[in-house]
Image (cartoon, coloured by chain):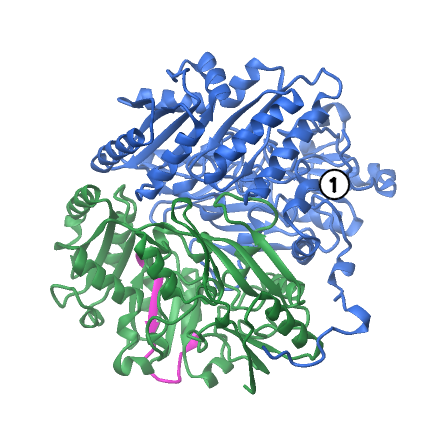
Amino acid sequence: MTDVLKPRDAKEVEDAVRWAIGHEKALELAGHGSKRAIGRPSQTDVTLDLSGLSGVTLYEPEELVLSAKAGTPLAEIEALLDKNNQILAFEPMDYGPLLGGGAGEGTIGGAIAVNLSGPRRIKAGAARDHFLGVAAVTGRGDSIKSGGRVVKNVTGYDLCKLMAGSWGTLAAMTDITIKVLPKAETEATVLVSGLDDAHAAQTMAAAMGSPFDVSAAAHLPDHVVSWFDGLPNAEAATLLRVDGFAPSVMHRKEALAALLKPFGPVAVLDAKDSQTLWRGVREVRPFAVGAARERPLWRISAPPRRGHEIANLITPAAQMFYDWAGGLIWVAMPVPDEPDAGSIRKAVAQVGGHASLIRAPASVRAAVDVFEPEAPGVAALSKRVKESFDPKSVLNPGRMWAGV
Amino acid sequence: MTLRMPDVDGEVLARRARIVSALRTIVPGEGVIDQAREMRAFESDGLTAYRQIPMVVVLPQTTQQVSQVLSFCYTEGIKVVPRGAGTSLSGGALPLADGVLLGMAKFNRIREIDFDNRVAVVEPGVTNLAVSEAVAHAGFYYAPDPSSQIACTIGGNVAENSGGVHCLKYGMTTNNVLGCEVVLMNGEVLRLGGKHLDAQGYDLLGVLIGSEGLLGVVTEVTVRILKKAEMQRAVLIGFSTSEDAGACVSAIIGAGIIPGGMEMMDKPAIHAVEEFVHAGYPLDVEALLIVEVDGPRAEVDYLIERVEAIAKTCNAVSCQVSTSEEQRLLFWAGRKAAFPAVGRISPDYFCTDGTIPRAKLPQVLAAMKKMSEKYGLRVANVFHAGDGNLHPLILYDANNPGELDKVEEFGSEILRLCVEVGGVLTGEHGVGVEKRDLMPVMFSEVDLDAQQRVKCAFDEKGLLNPGKVFPKLHRCAELGRMHISGGKLPFPDIPRF
């Protein structure tokens, strides 16, 4: 990394990208750099630091819409929303501590670029589902826009979807418009204790299949519970969160507790304990502290009812816990520098889904596929999409896969 | 009608007989229709102002047949127009004289219902309502509910990213589809997504949804199903001005309430509907809101009370809460019959579809009233108030020479206004041919080129549904070139900021 370009506005971003095209330089796109350690280590010449594009440019709480420059700190946006009793409903997780950095870092552009979502994803949708409009500079040096500032819009192709989760490989986003939602008045968590992973998956399916509008569902096996605050005992914990208006939460937590009684001992945690617990889930606490930080970490998304089968298909020395009603599995492998991609990929192929190596030393990430390899036809189409936006490969080249 | 479609390829038409017999070897029996009389059923979709008999109609039954038909057309340079149930209101399924019309109606099976993972795997020709019906016995449903849900198919919903009255709370098609099998124009079969969430890699599924049949033909769709709320109740609230109604919508959302549905009608729409359905709508109001809340009884009762209180502070002149399921359905029956109701008071109507920031509603309604006077045409408005999606219905008589042209001009002026106040050309009906030539109102040429390059990544020969969405067609080779002025890019030195 020899140089940093820090544009102050969208026009300067365009200048920088055009310069890179003209000189065949590869740019590393970064906001705060809080997720820099995820993905393939890319060979870039210059860092394009987008954190200078900062500030909320439009916020109309009653229209449920917020626009901000891409480098605006996520923390600033969340604080502003909180003042108005609103939230980013996709509950973006914080990768900072997990990757050895500080908490509370990250920009809105970065969150969208990696489609960052947390526990509420299963109810409210992912970051992509709240991403309404964008202005960006493509790898051709063209300033484009897509989408708008209204929720309901089918005018033209939904390029926002392509950009969410593209890890900065298609375009440098400069302005972002998102849908925001009211914050729940209160919350509670129904806890079922002592379940093994398979029974937990069954319990979570029953809860999700109830009309009680569960907003998050996680299972913490006994080997990780000690890392979480807010739990009444040291047994495996299956957590179901309900949130909303107080009379509704009161009713639903009781109804849910009654429904889940046949599955195991049930307790109900109040709003304060519930919030503490889910913060731990959102931050992947067991693997973000102490010696566990040395462990290579996988993030696996699978059909929720089958996610638990992964545990039986990989080494028993792996540690793990489940979010998204069993569909999101965080797996920490036992040996530093050895993510054991072979057995993880084989297990995922068996149950369906995809696995990403979220944390491993750069040398390891350079040697194994960090993201799930795509089927040949899909990979070829992805490559054509990449070329349509960035034919000279100037934006984060190779961050996702070689050539993309 | 002055709609310009891509030039007819005389060479293709000259080979018609051979093309038909080649297609018959792929889809045998009644799956290939080449008689003009029988093809008439496919000559238009819900936008009946435009009609065109296709070169030939093909109704495949298997993914393999779709793949072979597309691969054949790709090799032979034949255009293809995919079609679901043909309910598009924007002409998305308008045939081409030199094109194959690929009807997906025979893909009508529900392949799998998986309550454990809360998904259903269905073929694209299954109707929207049939998905909900198939899972209703277990108390589940499929959330997006476009008004045409009895007839429209999931494949068409994917193509158009269909919405419905509940999408403020439950999202549009794109938020409720997890995976699909898609056939590209060259015959390649791909799987995108599945029963899991958020696959890494480019969200190809996300850009396919809402691409109006220009990127691929979907042969299987995995949709998310949801458990039905315990109950729903609706409130009818009347206002003496649309400003008050708009302020009430903002106040409800401002109080942190996201209703399951929130619909508004203006006076002409209220009167047309009430005469037709007798839903008990007040006739002495300028604007009527239907607000529906859903959830457990405890929540519904609490929220209904709050909505009533908010309505009072917003100068509501009437407020009626549904006291039974029958009454709730009656409230909705009026709104859902708005289009046919307007059809009763006018020989023809033209429905358009823009979205605006909600706060601009009074301004847009006032401007529309003026336009109505200018064009000498009546207009009735139904409005998805929660998300700002406006459906003005322009009343006209197609038998009056020149009236349709005037209607289209009126419609265009409304949509231009929507964009001007910060909204968009279409909220849920799609661009199709109807709004195609208005795309430059919202997008620059550079924006549209970026979209067309995505089209090239999926369909580099431009054979799939050409003439829709984009006002100008470009060759992919031309789009792919980097445009460099004066032989070089204008930034020789590293920029310093």
Q: Is residue B419 left or right of residue A353?
A: right
- Tell me the quarter of the picture where residue B142 sits: top left
Frontmost residue, B40 versus A61:
A61
- Tell me the quarter of the picture where residue B424 sits: top right
**Quarter of the figure that contains the N terminus of chain B:** top right
Q: Secondary structure at mark 1?
A: helix
Residue at 32%, 37% in the rendered image = B228
Q: Is residue B400 left or right of residue B162?
A: right
* Crowd band around label 1 with a 10 angstrom C-alpha radius: few (<14), some (14–19), many (20+): many
Residue A71 can be seen in this image: yes
Residue at 41%, 15% in the rendered image = B283
Chain at tag 1? B
Frontmost residue, A145 versus B267:
B267
Magenta span of residues: A325-342
Position of residue B156 measured from the top left corner of the image (x, y, whole percent): 57, 39
Q: Is residue A228 left or right of residue B88?
A: left
Q: How many marks?
A: 1
Position of residue A187 measured from the top left corner of the image (x, y, whole percent): 22, 52
User: Mark 1 highlights which residue?
Assistant: B23
The green-coloured chain is labelled A
Residue A171 can be seen in this image: no
Q: Is residue B445 above or below residue B52?
A: below
Mark 1 belongs to which amino acid?
A: Leu
Position of residue B437 measured from the top left corner of the image (x, y, whole percent): 71, 41
The blue-coloured chain is labelled B
**Quarter of the figure that contains the C terminus of chain B:** bottom right
Q: Is residue A186 magenta?
A: no
Position of residue A188 measured from the top left corner of the image (x, y, whole percent): 19, 52
Residue at 34%, 68% in the rendered image = A330
Q: Is residue A202 left or right of residue A303?
A: left
